[in-house]
Image (cartoon, rainbow, N blue to C red):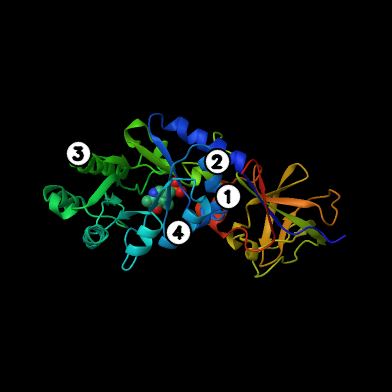
Amino acid sequence: MVPPAARLTIDLDALAANLAALRAQAPGAETAAVVKADGYGLGAGAVSRRLWAEGVRSFFVARLAEGEALRAELGGGRDAAIYVLDGLVPGAGPRTLAAGLTPVLCSPPQVEAAVALAAAAGRPLSCALHVDTGMNRQGLTPEETAALAQAPGRLAGLDLGLLVSHLGSATEPAHPRNGLQLERFAAVRALFPECRASFAASAGAFLGQAYRFDQVRGGISLYGGGPEERPDPRLKAVATLEAPILDVRSVRPGEFMGYGGDVRAEAPTRLAIVGAGYADGLIRASRGGHAWWNGARRRLVFVTMDLTAVEIGDEPARIGDMVELLGANVQIDDLAAAAGTVAHEILVRLGGRGERIYLGAP
Ligand SMILES: *Cc1c(COP(=O)(O)O)cnc(C)c1O
C-alpha cells in the first residue's frame, strides 16, 4: 500500500477551546478573531464559520481581498463586522463598500479618503482608527489623532466605532514599552469617549485588566500559540502535522547527515526518513528541535525540501508509520523556538502539499 501523504489536521474544537481561554482572560471585553493570512494558514473560511458559531461577531483581516473572501465565505446570513487592517488603500473604496468591510484607517490621507468615500456614497461609513502608540508600523501618531479630535469636521460622515492600537512587546510582560504604549493609548482614547477601544492582541490579553479595554483581538492564541512565545497549558494545539516514515537508515559514527558538513553522527544513529520538508512548511532551521513518534520525543536531525530525518534509537519502525512534526506533543512554540522564529511564521507556512483534514463541528 502507498504510504499516506503528509497530513495537516485542524481541530476546530481546540480552536473553540482556545477562544474560551481567551475570553476567560478578558471578561467584560469582546473577543474578536484575527483571521488574516487565510486564518494563519489554517483556512479562514472554516476557522471563521466555527468562530461565528461560538459567538464571535468581529473579525480582522489584513488585506482588502482577504476581507472580500471572508465576506463571501461567511455568506449573507452572517452579519459579521470585518475589519481590514490595511485600512482604505488607494482605490479600495468601492470594493470596501460593496463587501461591507470596515476599514481600520491608518494614516491622515486614509482618513481624508474615507470622508470622500462617505460623501460620495451619501451615507455614513463605518470605520475604525489605528493609532500608533509606539510600534512604528501602522497607524496615525497620537499627535495626528489628537488633531482629528480637535477638528471633528475632518471626520465628517464617518461612523467611527473603534479605536485600535497594537503592542510591540506584549510577549515580554515586564518590558517598559508595554506601559508606555498603554499610557499613550489611554490618553488618545480619552479624546474619543464615544468610541470603543481595542488595544490587546493575543499576548496583550494576558497582560492584565488595564490592557483589555472593550475588545481584544485574538490571533495566534486562538491557534494554540502561547502569549509569551512558549507553550501555555491553557491553550490547545489546533494544527497537527504528521508525515509517514518512508525509510529507516543506520548511520555509522563519523558520517555526515543531510546537507552541509555540520551534522555528524557521533555514535551509531538510526534515522527515520519522514516524508515532509520545506515544501510542507517545515523550516530548515528547526533541526535540533524534536518530533514525536511511538510515544516519545525524537530529535529532528535535519530538514530538507521533501524529507526530514528523525532519530529513533533501536525501536522497530514500519514504513508508513506516522510521525508527528507539530501538534499536541510537538508544541508550536517549541518548534518555533528551535527554528529561531515565532509561532505565527510556523503556521502560515503549513499545508503547501499533502492532505488537510478538519476535526470538530464546522
Ligand atoms: C496580526 C495582528 C493581530 C493579532 O496578533 P496575534 O499576535 O496573532 O494575536 C492583532 N492586531 C493587529 C493590528 C495585528 O496586525
CA gap between label 3 and label 1 equals: 38 Å
Badge 1 vs badge 2, beta-carbon distance below 8 Å = no
What label does residue 64 carry, if any? none
Q: Nearer the viewer, residue 142 or 314?
A: 142
Q: Which mark, by number, is residue 46?
A: 1
- The residue mark sitting in front, 4 or 2, is 4
Q: Which residue in the structure is indicated by mark 2?
A: 231
- Residue 203 quadrant: top left
Q: Earlier in the sequence, mark 4 or mark 3?
A: 4
Residue under label 4: 68
User: Residue shown at 13%/52% (left/top)?
Assistant: 153
Residue 217 location (% of width, % of height): 41, 43
Asked which secondary structure carries label 2, the reply is: loop
First in residue order: circle 3 vs circle 2: 3
How far across and down, in percent of the image, does residue 250 sit?
Answer: 82, 60
Estimate the spatial distance between the alpha carbons at disc 4 and disc 3, rounded to whole Å.
33 Å
